[in-house]
Image (cartoon, coloured by chain):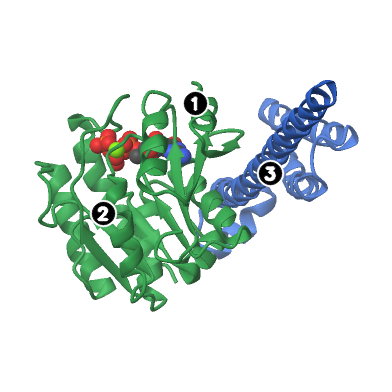
Chain colours: A green, B blue
């Protein structure tokens, strides 16, 4: 329980056995009374076992579906088990669970709350094409959502019942679909989106998924995904 | 004459392949019928390539063979698009199945854990009882 609400923390994880125990432990330590669901997305290491030993509930997918696939599973679990709030947190320890109560508070007046870097708190910086992509995404999405969004690809988000219900039935599994397209979809359906500044930490273990060489491709794909999302119903 | 032999034979081999696949139930009927239909049109054409010259002339195409090539490519493109569409639908279906499966497994794991905990409690209680009887 956080502020009288039943809260589920959903952690999508792919080969994160190095950090998942600490992340689960930290969440349970900082937020007593919340449930943690780790969605192991076809990991080849001991992610599922480590997470279960750390006290999380574990849903193990038979093969890799991507973050979007893992998250729809999480939202289905949240809906089926009657949670008021579902919060997505990364398995690499970059998100600080101490921000969770703040996100939950903001859900009183909003449907989807995003924990955003670059919004004043912390010192996370990005340069080059990756930065241009982020500027483009936040510019367009801020307009669509009619609120200031600076970190549209953040994987730190809190959803209330209405959004859980929607995401349980519809959540894209494609590249960037889990972040960019869901924002367009959610905003278009009249849900209120808000961001709160959060400080991001360095990942605890494992390798980051993006290399500088991929930044240019990322820009192109981000543009394509955004355009598609905007012309879809 | 030689060319007619090659094209005609190719058509017949394709026909035999499709029929055999259908017979072994390795091809869904809707696809089998599609290809059979195509072959029914293609085999006469392969034997008598001039068959479509009149139609081609009507559309301003010089030879019937060009017309067949053009239509064939358009048709193959459409089939490819259709198959991509089917694959997308299949991926969505397998995704849902994978999710269902993971949810069920999580539920079973939770139930088993609960049962184990209960068993452990019971044995602990029994042991306590025994100890108190002894004493
Ligand atoms: N379910 C699932 N989770 C994934 C997959 N790939 C990455 N993740 C998880 O998604 C979260 C974010 O992944 P990261 O690789 O940290 O991506 P990021 O935070 O955008 O980028 P960096 O941390 O800067 O590399 C982590 O919890 C990963 O374990 C995947 O294919 N499936
Ligand atoms: Mg990360």
Name the residue beneath numbered marker 1. A50
From the top left corner, tell me how far across and down residue A76 is, in percent: 58, 56
| Res A223 label | 2
- Which quadrant does the C terminus of chain A fall into? bottom left
Closer to the observer: label 2 or label 3? Answer: 3
Kindly tell me whether residue B63 is visible in this rendering. Answer: no
User: Residue A166 or A54: which is nearer the viewer?
Assistant: A54
**Which residue is painted at 68% across and 39% down in the image?**
B105
The alpha-carbon separation of the residues under discs 1 and 3 comes to: 18 Å
Label 3 environment density (alpha carbons within 10 Å; few <14, some 14–19, many ≥20): some
Name the residue beneath numbered marker 3. B107
In primary-sequence order, the first of circles 1 and 2 is 1
Label 3 sits on a secondary structure element that is helix
**Which residue is painted at 77% across and 32% down in the image?**
B125
| Res A171 label | none
**Which residue is painted at 49% across and 26% down in the image?**
A50
What chain does badge 2 belong to? A
């Amino acid at each position: 329980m956080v502020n009288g609400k039943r809260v589920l923390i959903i952690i999508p994880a792919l080969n994160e056995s190095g950090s998942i125990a600490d992340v689960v432990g930290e969440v349970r330590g900082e937020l007593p009374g919340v449930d943690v669901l780790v969605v192991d997305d076809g990991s080849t290491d001991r992610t599922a076992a480590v997470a279960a030993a750390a006290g999380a509930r574990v849903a193990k997918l038979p093969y890799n579906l991507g973050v979007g696939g893992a998250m729809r599973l999480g939202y289905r679990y949240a809906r089926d088990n009657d949670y008021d709030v579902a919060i997505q947190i990364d398995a690499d320890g970059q998100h600080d669970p101490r921000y969770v109560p703040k996100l939950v508070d903001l859900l009183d007046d909003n449907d989807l709350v995003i924990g955003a870097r670059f919004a004043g708190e912390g010192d996370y910086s990005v340069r080059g094409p990756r930065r241009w992509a982020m500027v483009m995404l936040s510019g367009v999405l801020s307009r669509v959502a009619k609120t200031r969004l600076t970190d549209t690809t953040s994987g730190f988000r809190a959803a209330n019942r209405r959004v859980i219900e929607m995401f349980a039935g519809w959540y894209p599994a494609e590249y960037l679909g889990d972040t960019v397209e869901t924002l367009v979809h959610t905003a278009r359906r009249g849900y209120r989106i808000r961001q709160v500044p959060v400080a991001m930490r360095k990942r605890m273990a494992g390798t980051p998924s993006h290399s500088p060489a991929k930044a240019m491709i990322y820009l192109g794909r981000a543009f394509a995904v955004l355009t598609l999302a905007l012309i879809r119903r | 004459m030689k060319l007619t032999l090659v094209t005609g034979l190719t058509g017949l081999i394709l026909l035999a392949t499709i029929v055999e696949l259908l017979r072994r139930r390795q091809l869904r009927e809707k696809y089998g019928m599609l290809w059979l239909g195509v072959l029914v049109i293609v085999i006469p054409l392969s034997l008598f390539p001039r068959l479509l010259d009149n139609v081609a002339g009507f559309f301003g195409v010089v030879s019937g063979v060009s017309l067949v090539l053009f239509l064939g490519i358009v048709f193959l493109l459409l089939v490819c698009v259709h198959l991509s569409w089917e694959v997308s639908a299949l991926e969505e279906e397998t995704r849902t199945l994978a999710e269902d499966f993971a949810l069920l497994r999580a539920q079973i794991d939770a139930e088993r854990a609960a049962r184990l905990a209960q068993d452990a409690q019971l044995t602990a209680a029994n042991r306590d009882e025994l100890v108190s009887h002894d004493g």
